Amino acid sequence: MKTIKIRLLFYFILTSFLPILMVGFIPYQKSSEVVRTQMLEFAQSAVNQLNENISYHLKEMELMSRIVYYQSIPVLRGEKTDALSENKSDPIEFNKFLAALKNNRTFIDEIHVINGDKVYTTAVKLDTDILARKEWYTSALEKTDEKIWIGPHESDYSINKPKTYEVITLIYPFKPVQSGKTALIMIEMKREKLDELFGSPNLKSLGKLLLIDKYGTVIYSPDRSLILPAQTGEKQYITNTNLIRSLNKDNSFVYDINFFSGWKVGAFIPNEKLEKSFDSIRETVFILLVIFFATSTFLGLTLSNHFTRPLQRLQRDMKQIENGNFHIRSHIQTDDEIGDLSRSFNRMVEEIELLIQKISENEQKKKQVEMKALQYQINPHFLYNTLNSVQWLAKLHKVPHIGDMVTALIKLLRASLNTKTYLHMLEEELEILSYYMKIQRYRFGDNFRTEYNIDPTLLKAVVPRFILQPLVENSFFHAFSDGEGTISIRATRIGDIVKIEVGDNGRGMSEEQVVNILCPEKKKKTSSGIGVKNVDDKIKHYFGANYGLSITSKENEGTTVTIRLPYQLKDREDVHYAQSINSR
């Protein structure tokens, strides 16, 4: 067995050498790679988000172009449309429609529709002569039915208030039906919107941001030096050897493709920022090494704390036992003194649990004895002998009604006092009830009626002995003491539940009386010695708390007592059979 002393010595030696290995150069290299990867992933995520924001505005522009297209076709043909007044060719009304569409989106600068010499625009004035000299404009006219995206450019052909100097344009040239001329829709977005998107606070930690068209031209960047024409008069290209070499020398490049326009959103992350993160890691490693060596003299205390944790766990388990939770077990499986203490604790808890179980079983047996005591109130031999004598005298004096009545009473008492079986079939319980009803028939004559509605499939179902007679007797004594009324007995099956209802049309009870009947402090017994509460206790004892009696009643309308039992067929005749049902 490994003692705590040996283990303390072993851990002390081990922890003296581990700091150098754990916080040395290999972890530094690994952590540097992780930090670099995480920073690049963050940059890629930021670029992706910027790209999504740009896509949203470009998509809005494309949607507007479609709206304008479908509204402009009837205008160009001279037809009436919802956007126009009764005057089919009134340009003022169509301009109002374009202005309303523009005003719904603050980032839109102007909307133009050009069809030859006809111009519809939201601007104060559109100079088509200046526009016709633009290379991108003349090139777009040659690409009918194709949407062309133009990066930030001057809008000197448009006069508006306030003046916007640069815009991003979506051009959609098309040919209206029955017209040989090419019409053109232009949706223009303010360049300030790109400034706003690229100037987001979460992008400030990145390096140089670029917007590149599908030909590789740098069409936008917060760093204007990347998009201004070079001294040679040529534009900067991201594929240009000098530019890519100079940027990649001290930066890492990440980008995302804007599939909506074909543009790329890119960012150059300065390697200097990555190196600064690595410097902080180096400083941290050095500080940790100093701390580890400076605190080596206190490792003994650290190790002792390590071994006190199992003791603390064992202490918490003991607190659970103090609070009554005897299902708790200690899971300390060490091969030392603490492990032995844990195993001894578990054995002690198991013995306590067994003792509690035995006490519970004794209480169950005590309850059974008390139940039997209810049935042994009088000497059965004395009753049988006395009643047989009465029956003999009735026959001797030729009074057959007395003899029949005594015979029914003998059978009833024999069933009541029979303690060999605790459960029997429903048909046997109904037979016992018939003896009692026969006696009451002699007492009350034809003043009461009995109605039976029994599912034949339930006659073999298991029920506790003597549960119906006390309920029927309760109706005679409390529902209609003069015996005048109707008693109904019904047995049905609902799934795995047997439902037996004993009802009468007597005087009924108040809600308070119904509650008091099943209240332990209000036990009421009939003349037979077994009350409604005892019947409920008996069912719960055999089958569990989910079964038993429930009572519904209304004053002057009658009472119904419902019995809930599990559906089982009789195969054994002892109390263990009922307990097995309860355990299922």
Image (tube, rainbow, N blue to C red):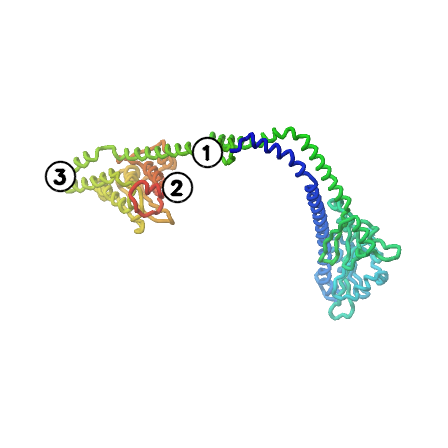
Is the C terminus in the top left, top right, bottom left or bottom right quadrant? top left
Q: Position of residue 367 (x, y in %)?
A: 33, 34
First along the sequence among labels 1 and 2: 1
Q: Quadrant of residue 85 in the image? A: bottom right
Q: Position of residue 413 (x, y in %)?
A: 23, 38
Q: Which residue is mark 1?
A: 346
Query: Which residue sits at x=77%, y=63%?
Result: 184
The amino acid beneath tag 3 is Trp
Nearer the observer, disc 3 or disc 2? 2
In front: 347, or 170?
347
Nearer the observer, disc 3 or disc 1? 1
Relative to residue 468, is residue 296 depicted above or below? Answer: above
Q: Which residue is mark 2?
A: 546
Q: Position of residue 196 (x, y in %)?
A: 76, 48
Asked whether the residues under the numbered discs 1 and 2 touch, taking CB atoms below 8 Å apart as contact, a structural biologist would say: no
Whole-number angstrom distance, CA of label 3 to CA of label 1: 69 Å
Q: Position of residue 297 (x, y in %)?
A: 65, 28
